[in-house]
Image: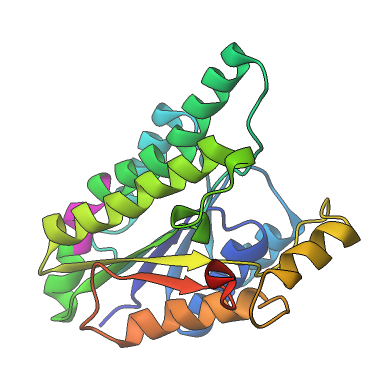
Amino acid sequence: MANPVAVVTGAGRRLGFEASMALLERGYRVFALYRSKTDDLLQLADRGAITLKADLADPDSLDRAIANILQQSEAVHLLVNNASEFTADEADQQALARQASRLFQVNSAAPMILMAGLAGALRQGCSDNSAPTLVINITDIFVEKPNPKFAAYCASKAALSNLTLSYARMLAPEVRVNAIMPGPVCFLPDHTAEDQARVLSETLLAREGGFDCVVQQILALLDNHFMTGALIPVDGGRRLA
């Protein structure tokens, strides 16, 4: 059998890069979708990943990326909808409307389009491999415990959570669809020391998890063929604090 095929969005940095590297280590042929070129993306290309520029805020750009993938592979075995945007709500009403529209497009509509557009290839992957293929949507613990300062972002991730359940039903039994809900995995550069201390004080395990804890869960879902429709927190217990 040829190498299995994975599609990872937001592959040029942070979690998307780490997940793509882990999949390359497992022998996957990785389509690494990105918006902006990074040194990490060049590293993926050097390892054999196929890099595809795609702006998830632009449905036409997304359609072109899907068409490009399908031209190069009839089957897809794993889709990781990782890319997202995270911004605090705008104060101005009109600016908030524009922001919300973009957040819902990037964080929920684009993953839905990818699941729909690659559904046939995911089913083909099951036929080739005699085991269900897999979609993993990266959501957020804010799905269950929203932050009012980020209401539009939280709602867009809640929409992706609901889409996970819908597509789990829609694509069964050939395709499994699950979500991972990260918590404080790795702080952004603009998080201050005070921000970090506050977040860790609200986390039961009182530390960052690191990207590896999410990558481990991705690999665990690959190995467990009897999980679908699961919404899995990887948050150090922050949602409970």
Q: Is residue 39 above or below residue 232?
A: above
In the rendered image, which quarter contains the N terminus?
bottom left
* The residue positioned farthest toward the right in the image shown: 193
**Quarter residue 19 falls in:** bottom right
**Near-viewer residue (235 or 10):** 235
**Near-viewer residue (8 or 197):** 197
**Quarter residue 81 falls in:** bottom left
* The residue positioned farthest toward the top in the image shown: 94
| Residue beneath the point at 30% across and 59% down | 73
x, y (%) of residue 110?
Answer: 40, 40
* In this rendering, position of residue 195 left or right of residue 63: right
Q: Is residue 55 visible?
A: no
Tell whether position 205 is magenta.
no
**Near-viewer residue (167 or 42):** 167
Q: Is residue 186 above or below residue 12?
A: below
Q: Is residue 192 visible?
A: yes
* In this rendering, position of residue 203 left or right of residue 118: right
x, y (%) of residue 137?
Answer: 40, 59
**Near-viewer residue (175 or 34):** 175
Q: Is residue 21 above or below residue 90?
A: below
Q: Is residue 20 above or below residue 161?
A: below
| Residue beneath the point at 10% across and 69% down | 173
Magenta extent: 117-122
x, y (%) of residue 78?
Answer: 34, 67
x, y (%) of residue 83?
Answer: 53, 51
* In this rendering, position of residue 116 left or right of residue 199: left
* In this rendering, position of residue 128 left or right of residue 98: left
Q: How many marks?
A: 0
